[in-house]
Image (spheres, grey):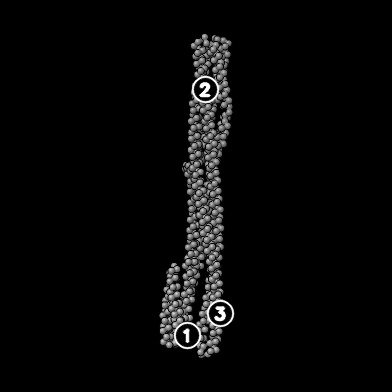
């Protein structure tokens, strides 16, 4: 299959650019996927988990408000209960805005149902207390404990489900980063391999044949036509140039051989002419014979010069064709240079995209680091809550002791103290569970930071590979420029050879003119014997000029090595 140089280079660059585009697409899609997953964790799952715990906390505050109302019959606790109920409704609304799964919706509906049942039961308790039906109110309160317990179980399961979901998302992010890294590494390796193969192909199939032709042209310019012109096997414009150059050298060799033969004949003729001139001066009876020989020699020389002149014209035309081919080759190298420039710009564009991906990776790493700091701040807050729970437990114990001292009058207070102690115990357990979850999140965040660091390292290695590719393109551009320079040198040397051929044609034309003058002189000698003396002088002068021209022609031909 015959392909032009332009087509070959375009195919190579198209393959490289395609691989670079695939690398960019994989990098960008991978970063967007990681960003979306972490956005889901930070903007949806963690806020939902926090709001679920807030619902649990507000429910416990409602329990305390109901107990306070039963003990003290103070309307302030009823108002507090309603205010907390409004906060719970607001929290439900916030959860609905942020949740993005059917499981979260199911948990929310269950919590709403239990909360609604608990709220209706508490309203009944408030009504019973107002009617001084304390025993019924307390019994009804005991019945409501099951709703509180159910809300606690639902919120605990909900929080655990959200935590497990976050862990799964983080694992998916790790797997995605690993696969993207492997894909990018493979594509970068293939790109480098193809670039090296393309560079070697161009050097072998373009640079070497042109260098060989340049050396052959230099040898020809020194007059050595004995060497064969190396033939290129690339089946493209360079192959055509090599064949044309070989034909030119062959024709030039034949021309020099023909000119050499003619010059030898010319020398022989000039010698004969000199001998005839001497014989004419010695014996007038041999004038007629000498004149006939001279006329015959002049006629033969005129025919030879006409043939030589025709061959010289053929050589001039061949050199003109070579000059035109050199111009075409120069245009092709210009097109190759432009193609290389486009390839360099595409690789530089790819390098900018890789730097953008690296910048995004740094931003993600910064966000994860910030998440780690916030997790540590949450741990500090949990420590404070734990201390408060311990203090509350201690106060509840002291209150129970004081109630025991008060006897029957302190029984109600003893019940409140016991509930407070239980709440403190539950708060401490919740703090421990939250601390465990925070530790797991912290561990996952640290692993993510490590993977992001690996991704940044991979992006830096990819940037180095792109820089190496740019260097390869630069080397290719330099090679193409050298090729263009060599083609111009070949063109200049062809022009020099063309000028030499024109000068040889002029010399042969001058020889033809002299031959015609000799023939005219011979006719004059034959037509009249009165002008024999002057005619002999003209013949002698013409013979001398002919000898000089023959010597000059032989001196020019001797420069060539056939």
Mark 2 or mark 3: which comes first in sequence? 3
Could you tell me if residue 182 is visible in this image? Answer: no
Q: Secondary structure at mark 3?
A: helix
Residues under labels 2 and 1: Cα distance?
141 Å
Image quadrant occupied by the C terminus: top right
Residue at screen point 52% across, 55% down: 355
Looking at the image, residue 160 lies above or below residue 274: below
Which dot marks residue 184?
none
Residue 71 is labelled as 1
Indicate left or right for 73 with 445 as reference: left
How many labels, in total?
Answer: 3
Label 1: few (<14), some (14–19) or many (≥20) C-alpha neighbours in 10 Å: some
User: Percent from the top left, x then y, of residue 326?
Assistant: 50, 36
Q: Earlier in the sequence, mark 2 or mark 1?
A: 1
Instruction: Name the residue that disc number 3 marks.
Output: 391
How far apart are labels 3 and 1 at the CA level?
23 Å
394 and 215: which is toward the camera? 394
- State which mark lies toward you, 2 or 1: 1
Name the residue carrying label 2.
Answer: 510
Query: Where 50 falls versus 530 (above or below)?
Result: below
Residue at the location (56% across, 72% down)? 380
- Closer-to-camera residue (255/150): 150
| SS label for mark 1 | helix
- 289 up-or-down from 185: above or below: above
Which badge, 3 or 1, is on the more N-terminal residue?
1
């Amino acid at each position: 299959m015959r392909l032009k140089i332009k087509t070959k280079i375009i195919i190579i660059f198209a393959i490289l650019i395609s691989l670079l585009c695939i690398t960019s697409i994989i990098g960008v899609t991978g970063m967007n996927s990681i960003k979306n997953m972490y956005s889901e964790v930070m903007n949806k799952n963690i806020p939902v988990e926090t709001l679920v715990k807030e619902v649990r906390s507000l429910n416990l505050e409602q329990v305390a408000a109901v107990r306070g109302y039963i003990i003290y019959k103070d309307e302030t606790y009823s108002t507090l209960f309603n205010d907390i109920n409004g906060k719970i409704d607001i929290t439900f609304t916030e959860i609905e805005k942020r949740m993005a799964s059917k499981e979260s919706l199911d948990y929310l509906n269950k919590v709403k149902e239990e909360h609604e049942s608990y709220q209706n039961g508490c309203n009944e308790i408030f009504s019973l207390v107002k009617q001084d039906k304390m025993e019924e109110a307390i019994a009804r309160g005991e019945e409501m404990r099951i709703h509180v317990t159910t809300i606690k179980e639902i919120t605990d399961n909900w929080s655990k489900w959200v935590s497990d979901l976050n862990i799964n998302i983080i694992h998916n992010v790790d797997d995605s980063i690993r696969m993207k890294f492997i894909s990018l590494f493979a594509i970068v390796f293939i790109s480098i391999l193809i670039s090296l193969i393309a560079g070697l192909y161009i050097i072998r199939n373009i640079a070497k044949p042109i260098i060989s032709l340049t050396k052959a042209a230099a040898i020809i310019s020194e007059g050595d036509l004995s060497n064969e012109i190396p033939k290129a096997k690339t089946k493209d414009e360079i192959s055509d140039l090599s064949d044309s150059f070989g034909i030119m050298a062959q024709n030039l060799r034949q021309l020099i051989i023909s000119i050499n033969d003619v010059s030898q004949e010319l020398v022989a003729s000039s010698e004969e002419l000199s001998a005839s001139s001497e014989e004419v001066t010695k014996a007038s009876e041999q004038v007629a014979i000498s004149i006939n020989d001279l006329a015959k020699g002049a006629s033969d020389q005129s025919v030879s010069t006409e043939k030589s002149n025709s061959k010289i014209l053929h050589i001039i035309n061949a050199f003109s064709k070579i000059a035109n081919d050199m111009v075409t080759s120069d245009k092709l190298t210009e097109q190759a240079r432009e193609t290389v420039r486009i390839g360099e710009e595409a690789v530089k564009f790819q390098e900018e995209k890789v730097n953008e991906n690296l910048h995004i990776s740094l931003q993600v790493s910064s966000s994860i680091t910030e998440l780690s700091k916030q997790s540590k701040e949450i741990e500090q807050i949990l420590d404070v809550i734990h201390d408060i729970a311990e203090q509350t437990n201690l106060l509840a114990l002291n209150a129970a002791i004081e109630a025991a001292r008060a006897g029957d009058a302190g029984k109600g207070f003893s019940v409140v103290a016991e509930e407070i102690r239980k709440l403190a115990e539950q708060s401490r357990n919740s703090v421990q569970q939250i601390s465990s979850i925070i530790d797991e999140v912290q561990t996952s965040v640290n692993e993510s930071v490590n993977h992001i660091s690996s991704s940044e390292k991979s992006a830096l290695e990819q940037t180095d590979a792109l820089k190496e590719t740019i260097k390869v393109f630069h080397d290719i551009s330099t090679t193409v420029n050298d090729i263009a320079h060599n083609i111009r040198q070949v063109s200049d040397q062809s022009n020099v050879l063309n000028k030499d051929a024109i000068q040889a044609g002029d010399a042969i034309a001058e020889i033809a003119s002299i031959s015609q003058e000799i023939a005219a002189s011979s006719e004059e000698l034959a037509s009249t014997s009165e002008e024999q003396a002057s005619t002999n002088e003209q013949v002698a002068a013409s013979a001398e000029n002919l000898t000089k021209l023959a010597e000059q022609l032989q001196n020019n031909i001797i420069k060539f090595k056939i």
